[in-house]
Image (tube, rainbow, N blue to C red):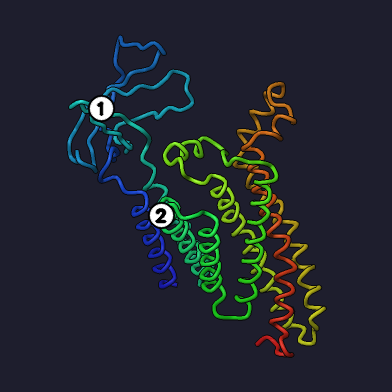
Amino acid sequence: MKANIIIAISGLFLMSAVLFYVFGGTNTGIYSIAEIKHIEQAEDEETELNDKIYIVELEHITGDYKGQRMVIDHFETEGSVYKLDLKPGDIVLAVIEKHEDQLIVGIDEHYKSRKIMGLIILLLLIIALISGVNGVKAMLALFFTLIIIFGVMTHYLMAGVPPLPLTVICAALIVFVSILIIAGLTQKALIAGIGTLSGVILAGFFGWFSVIFLKLSGYSGDETAYLQILNSNVDLKGILVSGIIIGALGAVMDVSISIASALKEILIANPDYTKKEMFKSGMNIGRDIIGSMVNTLILAYTGASLSLILVFSMQREDFPLIKIMNMEFICTEIVRSLAGLFGMVLAIPITAFVGSIIYLHKGKRVV
């Protein structure tokens, strides 16, 4: 058990190192971590927006100005829902920029990274203690997946590599290593891998066809517009389809592994099963799984868009259904959901068929 915990925490630190390598830390650049030493509201000072003005003394903990104290003005808009509510002792993320030999310092956010890391470590420890080896394997697979996405995909996408072939290669690598970590060098791993990769590729084809069929441009939000400004040569349609493939990967893998594992247990309990009976059982298992997975997938997207749904509900005159169903980013999210479902549904017969062939190849039974 102790070894499991060490492996889990080591994986977390490895992932953190990759994230810092890709995105950079806070030791350089315009951001620094700072502590609020003193804060008081300025008297008899008003702005055009009736902002409250606070005089804040900061001590920088990281960055080029580490150890230095600075006194700055901090503005908070009256009635705004976004208020930092600063107090002495709070750790914040400060912004320091130099314009014409003048230092401009501001407070951006509460510093949350350490608390997030604490929550992650707590969850990892709980998983390691309760799930044991299987939980640690799942975490290692997750760490590897995130490393591939943040450390490999982002690097080569920024380097100008075409998104679709790169994503397919990365998805295949994720599937191979993740299933190998979870299931080992077994028939179950082979069956789940073939089912997952097939389902993900089919989901990608569905996404690619939908982008062309619906004439989607790839602009799905402010982040895509900003990406286009930073790099006008980026293939937004390719990025969209790549996102669809990555989004479908987890759900399709879940379905394929579940079917492959269940078929193995069925064959152990019923060694006289034929290939036809095995395939039929796999299909029945898949139908039960898809019922819950459909809800999981749709609810995940719905939960992430709950605020937007409320806005539409409150402004029905401006956003009737015909308008909503033709908005670019709404169509994009619908295509993401449909592609994921498409890949999951087709992974069921593929995994069931491959399982019936491999498990019963030449009469050879599972051992």
Q: Are marks 2 and 1 in contact (CB under 8 Å)?
A: no
Amino acid under label 2?
A: His
Amino acid found under the numbered disc labelled 1? Ile
Whether residue 333 sits left or right of residue 147 in the image: it is right
How packed mark 2 is, by other alpha carbons closer than 10 Å (few <14, some 14-19, many 20 or more), is some
Please tell me whether residue 100 is drawn above or below residue 358 in the rendered image.
above
Quarter location, residue 13:
bottom left
- Residue drawn at the location 82% of the way across and 79% of the way down: 276
Measured as percent of width and height from the top left, residue 201 is found at 63, 61
Kindly identify which residue carries mark 1. 104
Q: Could you say which is closer to the camera, residue 346 or residue 207?
A: 207
Q: Is 292 on the left or on the right of 224, as rendered?
A: right
Q: Is residue 80 above or below residue 285?
A: above
Q: Is residue 299 visible?
A: no
Marks 2 and 1, Cα distance to the nearest angstrom? 32 Å
Q: Quadrant of the N terminus?
A: bottom left
